Amino acid sequence: MAFDESEIKIIKRAIPLILVFVIMSLVLVTIFGAWYNVHMDRSLAPETEEFNMHLTKVSLKVDSSTLPSALEMDMSYDELKDVSSEDDINTTGLNTDSLNVFGSTLYFISSALTISIFSIILMLLSAFNFGNIELFKKTVTYFCIIIFVLTIAAGALFMVQVHFSNLVDADVGFWFSSKVTNIIKASGGPGASWYMSFVTGGAALATAIMLYRKPVDDIILTKLDQETEKKIAQRDPSKYPCPDCGHHIPLDSKVCPYCGREFEEFKGLF
């Protein structure tokens, strides 16, 4: 499969943009998804309660024999604290002091989202040929490393904080199934967004490595466009291969437009 010069430029600018966009999408999933789920069984009513805890709100589903149908509602953590402490009686079985863990985790993930947005802006500028393209790529590489640190730290610290803060009023761990009181049994564990924080971190690190060690767009183009490079070399003897990436470039070039390698000292070899 052969590409002309304009198509090569589009591919080289589009692939990093797509990778960064995927990372931002993963960060958004971690923000809006559930980080922790708690299931309560009450034998008095009988009644079951499902707490799907997001970073900014909790989704509550109550299924009771005293209700004609299941009750579903969303509330902020401040509202949940008010409900739990009504008349100085904890009516939810949750340790309200531990709910601050969601706010601290939100800071990490929001920071990762902000950095991913800046990365997309830089890649868009690069795609439309504004500014120093190679500098933008290097900056995005470091941005991806920061996103990796933030998302992995968010997931790890969240697990530690939940484990030691006793989210439910019982001495339980991160994954648990326990009898809280004589009438309340509880079970809980991390939601999909907690797992996604590690997936996001892995994707950000992989992107950073690919952008740093050898641009992923060059890897793809090298596989797809080897025949075109050979034809260019045969048709135009005024070009020679870059010692680093192998693309054929004009003899008077000082910097490879594909990989950024300075190869003036190699001219005498060709």
Image (cartoon, rainbow, N blue to C red):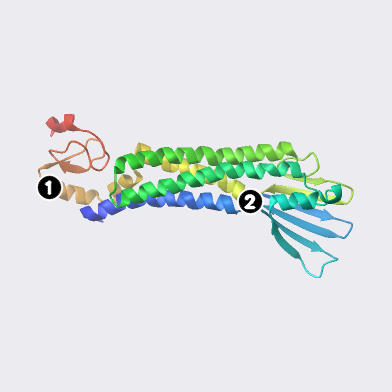
State left or right for residue 131 relative to residue 158.
Answer: left
State left or right for residue 134 relative to residue 81.
Answer: left
Q: For mark 1, does the 10 Å Cα neighbourhood hold few (<14), some (14 to 19), or many (20 or more) residues?
A: few
The quarter in which the C terminus is drawn is: top left
In x, y percent, where is residue 116? 46, 46
Secondary structure beneath label 2:
loop
Secondary structure beneath label 1:
helix
Q: For mark 2, does the 10 Å Cα neighbourhood hold few (<14), some (14 to 19), or many (20 or more) residues?
A: some
Q: CA distance from mark 2 to mark 1?
A: 62 Å
In x, y percent, where is residue 185? 82, 50
Amino acid at circle 2? Thr
In x, y percent, where is residue 199? 53, 46
| Res. 33 visible in picture | yes
Q: Name the foreground residue: 259 vs 82.
A: 82
State left or right for residue 136 relative to residue 152.
Answer: left
Q: Which residue is mark 2?
A: 56
The quarter in which the N terminus is drawn is: bottom left
State left or right for residue 150 relative to residue 257.
Answer: right
Amino acid at circle 1? Gln
Q: Which residue is mark 1?
A: 234
Q: Residue at x 73, y 48 (%)?
A: 188
Image quadrant assignment for residue 102: top right
Q: Residue at x 61, y 46 (%)?
A: 194
Q: Is the residue under label 1 in contact with that under label 2 (CB below 8 Å)? A: no
Count of all numbered marks drawn on residues in the image: 2
Indicate which disc, 2 or 1, sits on the residue closer to the N terminus: 2
Image quadrant assignment for residue 249: top left
Q: Name the foreground residue: 238 vs 181.
A: 181
Nearer the observer, disc 2 or disc 1?
2
| Res. 2 visible in picture | no
Q: Residue at x 62, y 37 (%)?
A: 157
In x, y percent, where is residue 155? 60, 41
